[in-house]
Image (spheres, grey):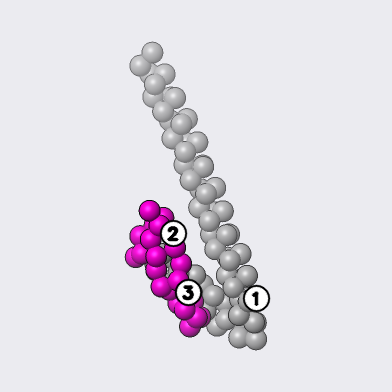
Amino acid sequence: MQNKAEIRILGQKYTIRGDTSEKEMKELASYVDAKIKEVLDKAPSVTPLNAAILAALNIAGEFHKLKKEQQEVALRLTEKTQTLSGLFE
């Protein structure tokens, strides 16, 4: 079931649909809005479109870093599990 949410990014109102709850969609929109505003605060002469692109790259960087950390944790967990299971053989 698709949920619907009205969100605001840089003062622009959007109606979006998604599989997540309305609350989560609004939280994500708020996060994106904050990231764009962060870029605009650091570089006020940047256009909103370029700020959105830079914010998207920043968010992608955060995601990539977290994904890499998660993979490293999963690898360590697998190694420890194999070590532990070897003790019971």
Type of amino acid under label 3: Tyr
Position above or below: 35 against 84: below
Provide the secondary structure element on which disc 3 rests: strand
Position above or below: 22 against 9: above
Is 40 magenta? The answer is no
Position above or below: 87 against 31: above
Question: In this orientation, which residue lies closer to the viewer: 20 or 83?
Answer: 20
Picture coordinates of residue 24 (x, y %)? 37, 62
Q: Residues within 10 Å of mark 1 (few under 14, many from 20)?
A: some
Provide the secondary structure element on which disc 1 rests: helix
Q: How far apart are marks 3 and 1 (CA)?
A: 19 Å
Work out whether residue 31 can be spotted.
no
Question: In this orientation, which residue lies closer to the viewer: 18 or 77?
Answer: 18
Q: How crowded is mark 3: few (under 14 residues within 10 Å), some or many (20 or more)?
A: few
Magenta part of the chain: 1-23
- The structure residue drawn at horizontal position 64% and vertical position 82%, both measured from the top left corner, is 47
* Mark 1 lies on residue: 50
* Mark 2 lies on residue: 18
In screen coordinates, is 35 left or right of 85? right
* Mark 3 lies on residue: 14
Type of amino acid under label 1: Asn
